[in-house]
Image (spheres, rainbow, N blue to C red):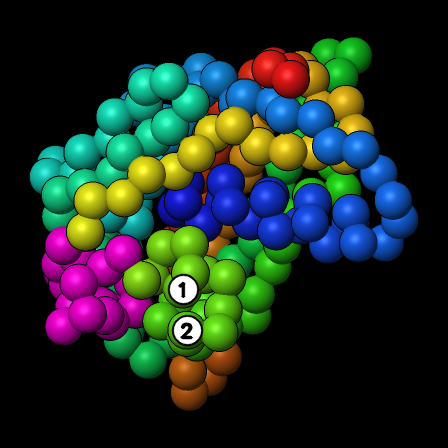
């Protein structure tokens, strides 16, 4: 999750930079929570990342501008069927004048499973490729285990505008029955809180 979201920001900034000449500055995203992920209290019963994965055997080590990820995680999204369609959205918000306000950085997909292991997709490049190849099934497969090849996520990013201040990344997913297209009851919602500090 964090791998996808952090690098998604890099990709979106790169797209923006191609539109007009700009000068970039480096900012480090200082995580507010050593365990990286928080839940979404506005959704009753939400347990954040634990609604998506059993994290007991996943290692997340945050140090010197990087998060190192390894171990194994069990797909924990209850009430799913393997062929369900998953809609997801990631959005970066900034805390300003007492409220969380949107920024230009967001992304959405209507079929997450199609992108997870597609070598042409950003989702694959930033997350799916780090899963052992023989275990590449979608998160809709309840109880399936992902073993991760150890990888690092850089939390020092380039932006063409001043992004200093408190932010949160909100990731939400909803599954839909492949036959009826009706939404499954459980919505996944995960938040990552932190602060961007200019480093160069």
Other residues around mark 1 within 10 Å, as few (<14) / some (14–19) / many (≥20)? some
Residue, x 84% and y 38% (percent of image)? Answer: 22
Whether the residues at callouts 2 and 1 have beta carbons within 8 Å, the answer is: yes
Residue, x 52% and y 23% (percent of image)? Answer: 29
Q: Quadrant of residue 159?
A: top right
Residue, x 17% and y 63% (percent of image)? Answer: 132
Side of 180 where 50 appears, left or right: left
Question: Does the image show residue 47?
Answer: no
- Tag 2's secondary structure? loop
Main SS, magenta residues: loop
Residue on which disc 2 sits:
119
Residue on which disc 1 sits:
124
Q: Closest to the observer: 59 or 172?
A: 59
Q: Which residues are magenta?
A: 130-147
* Image quadrant where one finds the C terminus: top right
Percent x, y of residue 55: 19, 39
């Amino acid at each position: 999750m964090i791998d996808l979201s952090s690098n998604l920001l890099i990709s979106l900034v790169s797209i923006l930079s191609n539109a007009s000449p700009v000068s970039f500055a480096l900012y480090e995203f200082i995580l507010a929570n050593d365990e990286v992920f928080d839940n979404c209290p506005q959704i009753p019963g939400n347990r954040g990342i634990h609604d998506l994965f059993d994290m007991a055997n996943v290692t997340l080590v945050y140090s010197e501008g990087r998060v190192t990820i390894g171990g194994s995680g069990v797909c924990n999204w209850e009430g799913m069927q393997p062929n369900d369609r998953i809609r997801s959205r990631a959005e970066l918000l900034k805390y300003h004048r007492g409220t969380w306000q949107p920024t230009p950085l967001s992304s959405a997909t209507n079929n997450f499973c199609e992108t997870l292991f597609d070598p042409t997709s950003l989702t694959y490049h930033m997350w799916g490729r780090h899963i052992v190849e023989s275990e590449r099934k979608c998160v809709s497969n309840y109880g399936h285990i992902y073993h991760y090849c150890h990888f690092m996520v850089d939390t020092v990013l380039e932006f063409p505008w001043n992004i200093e201040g408190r932010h949160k990344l909100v990731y939400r997913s909803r599954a839909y029955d492949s036959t009826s297209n009706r939404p499954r009851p459980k919505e996944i919602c995960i938040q990552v809180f932190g602060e961007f500090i200019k480093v160069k």
